[in-house]
Amino acid sequence: MKLDKYESYIQKMIAENILKEVDRAVSFFHESFFDYAFARIFFQDGDSIYTFIIKGDQYLFRRAQIRQLLLFYREEDIVQYVKEVKDIIEDKKIRYHLKDVVFKMLNSLENPDMIEYKLMEKYLKDEKSEFFTQFWNVIFTEKWGNLLIENKVIDESFIYNKEDKI
């Protein structure tokens, strides 16, 4: 077996609940941990998420990997992350379900950043843009609202009317 030389490492990882063994098959304890490990190695190798998508299959199961890759790049290299997001969104060869991963990831951010807003700004200002509605849905959250108010992109009255204020 190819993994025999790693048996001691595998047993340690099983003991630490990083891996699990069922019927002599070894797997990660959770799919998201695999996705994180994959993203870390992918980033360290200097690979492009966009190129990975274009050169590979664009099957549904890639969504979790793409999300994890984007989140990892966001933490490690914000400039490269923004380039990847832009490339994914703008390329017509990338299937919509993978672009939707980008929209949902941006929408769920706990700490959105103005650099991400700047990326979306042209779509938000052009009602005829292909992703006008999707990007408005992204920023229609409390976290995004707070960021945009703090940075004076929108006024608080845009979100709250006088009756809503306490």
Image: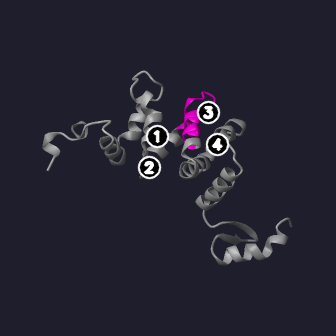
Q: Main secondary structure of the magenta part?
A: helix
Question: Which residues, given as a range, are shown in magenta?
Answer: 81-99
Mark 2 residue element: loop
Q: Could you tell me residue 102's position as x and y percent?
A: 52, 41
Alpha-carbon neighbours of circle 3 within 10 Å: few (<14), some, or many (≥20)? Answer: some
Separation of residues labelled 3 and 2 (CA atoms): 23 Å
In the image, taking residue 14 as reference, residue 154 lies left or right, namely left
Alpha-carbon neighbours of circle 4 within 10 Å: few (<14), some, or many (≥20)? Answer: many
Q: Mark 4 points at which residue?
A: 49
Q: Could you tell me residue 4's position as x and y percent?
A: 84, 71
Q: Name the residue under label 2.
A: 109
Q: Is residue 86 magenta?
A: yes
Q: Could you tell me residue 114's position as x and y percent?
A: 42, 41
Q: Does label 3 or label 2 sit earlier along the sequence? A: 3
Vertical placement of 124 versus 161: above or below?
above
Q: Which amino acid does label 1 sit on?
A: Glu
Front-lying residue, 86 or 128: 86
Of circles 4 and 1, the one toward us is 1
Q: Which residue is drawn at 53% across and 42% down?
A: 101
Separation of residues labelled 1 and 3 (CA atoms): 20 Å
Label number found at residue 116: 1
